[in-house]
């Protein structure tokens, strides 16, 4: 129960922040927040920087889409205005999407199992 405050309880906040961080792995969502002007809002940018705690070992284990943390890093990089402004462009959104697809398509087939490799050696 939230009581008199409008703030969510700790469990709800954890879930909401986890879902939000993972949304950053979606090129469609990145395009949406760029188009809506959120990436130009200092309060929103401060929120993104706050969310970097998700990279710590006790939290990262809950992340199902690790590339979302990579995008969080890029978005929080003060030197990366070009990336943030490019996200407004639909062609850039599509480029990011295609690069994700190619990565997953080829990465999954090229991974090795280090434990199995160790036993074969």
Image: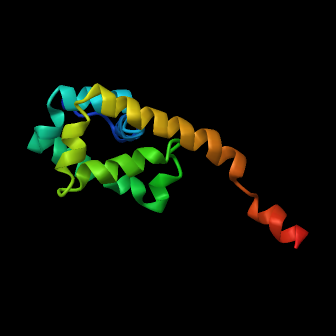
- Chosen colour scheme: rainbow
Residue extending farthest bottom: 121
Where's the N terminus, which quadrant? top left
User: Closer to the camera, 62 or 93?
Assistant: 93
Q: Nearer the viewer, residue 44 or 26?
A: 26
Instruction: Determine whether 80 is above or below 13 in the image.
Output: below
Total of numbered circles in the picture?
A: 0
Asked whether residue 31 appears in the rendered view, the answer is: yes
Q: Position of residue 46 (x, y in %)?
A: 17, 49
The residue lying furthest to the right in this view is 120
Task: Find residue 83 and report its image quarter.
Answer: top left
Q: Is residue 46 above or below residue 102?
A: below
Q: Quadrant of the C terminus?
A: bottom right
Point 40% across, 37% down: residue: 96
96 over 32 or under it: above or below: below
Q: Residue at x 22, y 42 (%)?
A: 84
x and y percentages locating residue 49 in the rendered image: 24, 52
Q: Would you say 79 lies left or right of 2 here?
A: left
């Amino acid at each position: 129960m939230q009581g008199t405050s409008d703030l969510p309880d700790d469990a709800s906040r954890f879930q909401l922040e986890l879902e939000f961080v993972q949304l950053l792995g979606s090129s469609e969502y990145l395009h949406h927040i760029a188009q809506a002007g959120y990436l130009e809002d200092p309060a929103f940018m401060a929120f993104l920087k706050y969310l970097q705690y998700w990279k710590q070992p006790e939290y990262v284990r809950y992340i199902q889409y690790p590339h979302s943390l990579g995008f969080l890093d890029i978005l929080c990089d003060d030197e990366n205005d070009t990336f943030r402004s490019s996200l407004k462009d639909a062609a850039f959104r599509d480029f990011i999407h295609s690069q994700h697809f190619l990565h997953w398509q080829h990465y999954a087939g090229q991974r090795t199992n280090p434990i199995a490799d160790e036993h074969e050696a």
